[in-house]
Structures are given as C-alpha cells and as structure tokens.
Amino acid sequence: MLHSASGFRGIRVGAVAGAPARHEPLDGGAAQPRICVTYRCAKGHETALVFAQLPEEQIPGVWDCRRCGGAATRDESRFALEDEPAEGFKSHLEYVKERRSSQDAEDVLAGALERLRARGALPDELLGDA
C-alpha cells in the first residue's frame, strides 16, 4: 500500500512478498520452549536470562553479573569457590591512564585544542587559558 510520504511504509527492508513476519515460526508451529535461569553474584545481584530448553549441562553455570561484573552462579553455595577477579572491571579511562602518563594526556589535549582553534571551532577566550 502506497503512502503519500513514503512508498515503502510498513515494509521491512529485505522482506520477500508473502513471507511470514519475522516473529512467526517458518513452519507455522509453536516456538521452542524456553526456560528462565537466575544467576546471583556474591554481592547479591540477580541476573535473569532466558535460554532455550536445553539439557542441564549445556546451560552455563557461571555468567557475568550485569551490575558489578563479578562472577554470578546458579548455585549460591559456589560463591566461596569462585575467586573474585583481582582488579575487577576497568573503565575506559583507567585503561587510558595505564597507557599514557598525565604529561602525555596534557600534550594530546593541547594538540587537540590547538587544531580546534586553528579551524576556528574553538575561540581562545572559551577556556580562559589563551
């Protein structure tokens, strides 16, 4: 159906005419059964994931916690067995600080500001360090 604003309104890119919608099974049958698995980390955070109904040995026993990044397990008795990572997660800034000294960072910043000022994109009085 054509629309005044767009000739392809409501049509997914790459869709074949007469094909079933993406969320419908191709064979017309029911979707595969699924199970919800809850993982808990040592800090008490819960992460609930949905898996296809698989044999028990195919479902991961350990998953990364979404909140703190620690190891989350299905069995709370395994918390004592899990070793906490020595450093935990690092932010992008922490990785940058490992690679560059503060003098290197100041040099990079000064160069970037100089290029912006040369293009006229950054006035000298904006930062007050002219």
Image (spheres, rainbow, N blue to C red):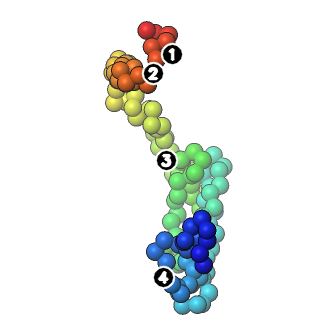
Residue type beneath disc 4: Val
**Local secondary structure at mark 3:** loop
> Mark 2 vs mark 3: which is more N-terminal?
3
Q: Secondary structure at mark 2?
A: loop
Horizontally, residue 35 falls left or right of residue 101, namely right
Quarter of the image with the N terminus in it? bottom right
Residue 22's label in the rendered image is none
Q: Considering depth in this image, is 65 or 15 the residue closer to the camera?
A: 15
User: Counting residues from the N terminus, which is met first, the one under dot 4 or under dot 2?
Assistant: 4
CA gap, disc 2 and disc 1: 7 Å
Callout 1 secondary element: helix
The residue under label 3 is which amino acid type?
Asp
Residue type, numbered disc 1: Leu
Q: According to the image, label 4 marks what residue?
A: 16
- The earlier-in-sequence mark between 4 and 1 is 4
Task: Determine which residue is flagged by label 2.
Answer: 122
In the displayed structure, 98 sits above or below 88; it is above
- CA–CA distance between discs 2 and 3? 49 Å
Q: Residue extending furthest front?
A: 4
Q: Residue at position x 46%, y 17% from top?
A: 123
Q: Which mark is residue 126?
A: 1
At x 57% / y 80%, what residue is drawn? 21
x then y, percent, for residue 99: 34, 30
Q: What amino acid is found at the position of numbered circle 2 in the picture?
A: Leu
Instruction: For the C terminus, give its image quadrant.
Output: top left
